[in-house]
Image: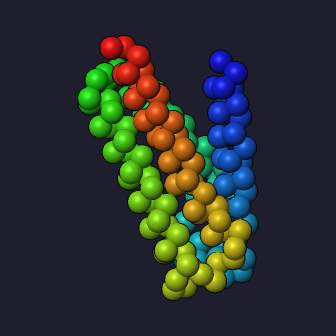
Amino acid sequence: MRTNLFYYLVLLVLTVVAGWLLAHPNLIGQIGIFWYDHDYLETLPKAMATVAVTVLIALTISLVIKRVTSGPLAVVLAIGLFVVCLFLVFQTYTQFSSGAYRFTGSGFKTGAVLLPIILAIVFGKTSYDVITTRRTKR
């Protein structure tokens, strides 16, 4: 239980940091948020809620994978979602390192990359848990 408490505490801290970073872009980032109508990132509470809901949905999917599915299906789903999240980390990093996004401020870019990293952590732990519980059941 201690390990799970530490895991959830780390997720909470990362979620707060990502929400705070996404809510504080520089002037060009603020113009982009207004121009592209990203209302969910305009204020700190909205950005925090967006990140928190996304992480809670990922944790719910993780719980469903661990509790409802079993066997090879659980392993495939968990590893598949982990790989998708790793791809999203790469895609977000490359997108925010080029074009107009590179001028949105380093904090905003870090927050944007941190969200898929959090999701990769969630599904990576799910993959680990599913694989290790599968081995011990034999």
- Using the rendered view, name the quadrant where residue 2 is placed: top right
105 or 34: nearer the viewer: 105
Q: Is residue 63 visible?
A: yes
Q: Position of residue 14 (x, y in %)?
A: 68, 47
Left or right: residue 133 versus residue 3 is: left
* Residue displayed at 44% across by 60% down: 88
Left or right: residue 5 versus residue 56 is: right
Task: Tell me the quarter of the image containing the N terminus.
Answer: top right
132 or 54: nearer the viewer: 132
Q: Is residue 124 above or below residue 50?
A: above
Q: Position of residue 134 (x, y in %)?
A: 36, 22
Q: Is residue 103 above or below residue 39?
A: below
Q: Is residue 50 visible?
A: no
* Residue displayed at 52% across by 83% down: 98
Q: Is residue 89 above or below residue 30?
A: above
47 or 69: nearer the viewer: 69
Q: Seen from this angle, which residue lies furthest top? A: 137
Q: Seen from this angle, which residue lies furthest left? A: 72
- Using the rendered view, name the quadrant where residue 132 is placed: top left
Left or right: residue 18 versus residue 92 is: right
Q: Is residue 85 above or below residue 72?
A: below
* Residue displayed at 55% across by 66% down: 38
* Residue displayed at 49% across by 61% down: 89
Q: Position of residue 62 (x, y in %)?
A: 45, 32
Q: Position of residue 138 (x, y in %)?
A: 33, 14
